[in-house]
Amino acid sequence: MYKTPDDLLRMVDTERENVPSLGLGFKKTTLDPELHQRLVAHLTRSIQLFKSEPANAFVKTDNSNAYPSLLYHDDAFNEQLMKDLKPAHEEWSGVKLKNEACFGIRVYQPGSYLLNHSDHARTHVVSSTICVDSSLNNPWPLYVEDHDGKAHQVDMGPGDMVFFEGARLIHGRPYPMDGDYFASIFVHFSPLDWDVDGDAK
């Protein structure tokens, strides 16, 4: 498992301190089949539009011959996906939410890995990661630490979705991917009654 550098962990801890816990943790579920098929069709018809995503502080690769991921972002499609998924996130979280961000589709490449981290405070409070499609030789689990710091490995296949407190829980995919690709999209909301500093009103 690749370890997140200490300086990045300190940055992550600073962010997490600004976000109250909702006490939810995480939950694996299955995406509505109609929405999943829409995502697969979007991936298929947009495949020629994906661009190489250079390595950043958290998305990396141990494959010297490849970028860690490919990325295509369609604002209109992603806005509609957030709208369609907000009720499910509100049901899981038990709070009214506002749209914050939908990122992707990101297609991880052979050898890529995602260092453990937490997401942006104030915006990525109630989140989900969705497996759109994948071709793996071995499982490439989502690593997530619960509120007690206990580590979990969550296997995901096409159509699986994991709700989680993105700004509170440490998560990632810190093992090199063994396979051809893993396509994901990420959806983020924040509670409607929190101010911009992430504090409940």
Image (cartoon, rainbow, N blue to C red):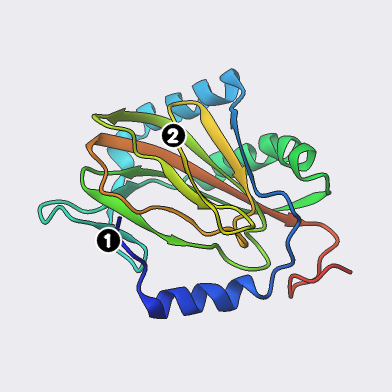
Q: Quadrant of residue 195?
A: bottom right
Q: Nearer the viewer, residue 113 or 89?
A: 113
Q: Nearer the viewer, residue 198 or 80?
A: 198
Kind of residue at disc 2: Asp
Residue sitting at 31 percent across and 52 percent down? 113
- Image position, residue 132 (x, y; %): 44, 31
**Residue that carries the numbered disc 1 in the rendered image:** 54
Q: Residues within 10 Å of mark 2 (few under 14, many from 20)?
A: few
Q: Quadrant of residue 100?
A: bottom right
Measure the C-alpha gap from mark 2 to mark 1: 26 Å
Residue 4 lies, with reference to residue 49, above or below; the image says below
Q: Quadrant of residue 101?
A: bottom right
Residue sitting at 44 percent across and 30 percent down? 42
Q: Is residue 7 left or right of residue 194?
A: left
Q: Is residue 100 left or right of residue 69?
A: right
**Residue that carries the numbered disc 2 in the rendered image:** 155
